[in-house]
Amino acid sequence: MSKGREISCYDYVNHPYEQVRDALSKDALAVFQSATKAAASRARSIASELRVDIGGIGVEADIVISIKKIEEQASEAMAGPVTRLQLEWQAAKMPGLFPLMKAELSVYPLTRTETQLDFSGIYEPPLGTVGKAVNAIVGHRIAEVSVHRFVSDVAGYLRQTLA
């Protein structure tokens, strides 16, 4: 995979780091799926769903997320622990028409009662030259909104379920 296009975003969870870390370390895929799927669809699918509205047109795709690695370590930059989830996702159907996302979700404490989720990922537009042209016009906006929505959905789900 070449350099690709970078996407970063973050959100907060108003719960202690240990609770957020434990929920994601125990079963991150279930958290992602529960955060991004409607209740009726959740029971039928092992995929998560990304949804975005661009100019009044809804774009959605079921995605398959794979967790490549989860590690916790002390962070000198943050003076505390950080848990990193290395993940990839691609469209569940016709993956060749959608970008492959390779990303890291970092989880770390801000205070004793607040945790930050930091997403940093890279994707390569599909379909070669045509895909790069579409990405330059609108594709990168769709990808950015999708990632922001994903992180927001995960943070919102954790805020509600850890209460």
Image: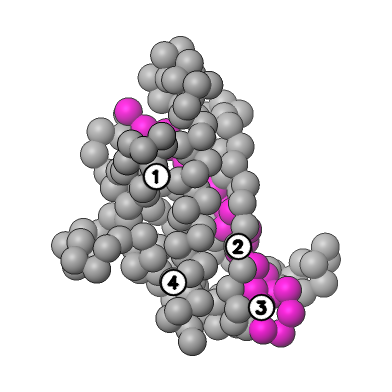
Question: Nearer the N terminus, badge 4 or badge 3?
Answer: 3
Dots 4, 1 in contact, CB < 8 A: no
Q: Residue at x 32, y 52 (%)?
A: 49
What residue does disc 4 label? Answer: 157
Q: Residues within 10 Å of mark 1 (few under 14, many from 20)?
A: many
The mark nearer the N terminus, 2 or 1, is 2
Which badge, 4 or 2, is on the more N-terminal residue?
2
Residue 114 image label: 3
Amino acid marked by disc 4 = Tyr
Identify the secondary structure beneath mark 1: strand
Residue 78: quarter of image: bottom right
The residue pinned by badge 1 equals: 52
Amino acid type of disc 1? Val
The residue indicated by pointer 2 is: 11
Residue 83 appears in the picture as rendered: no
Residue 65 x %, y %: 38, 52
Q: Amino acid at mark 2?
A: Asp
Q: Position of residue 120 (x, y in %)?
A: 61, 48
Determine the secondary structure under disc 4.
Answer: helix
Upstream in the sequence, badge 1 or badge 3? 1
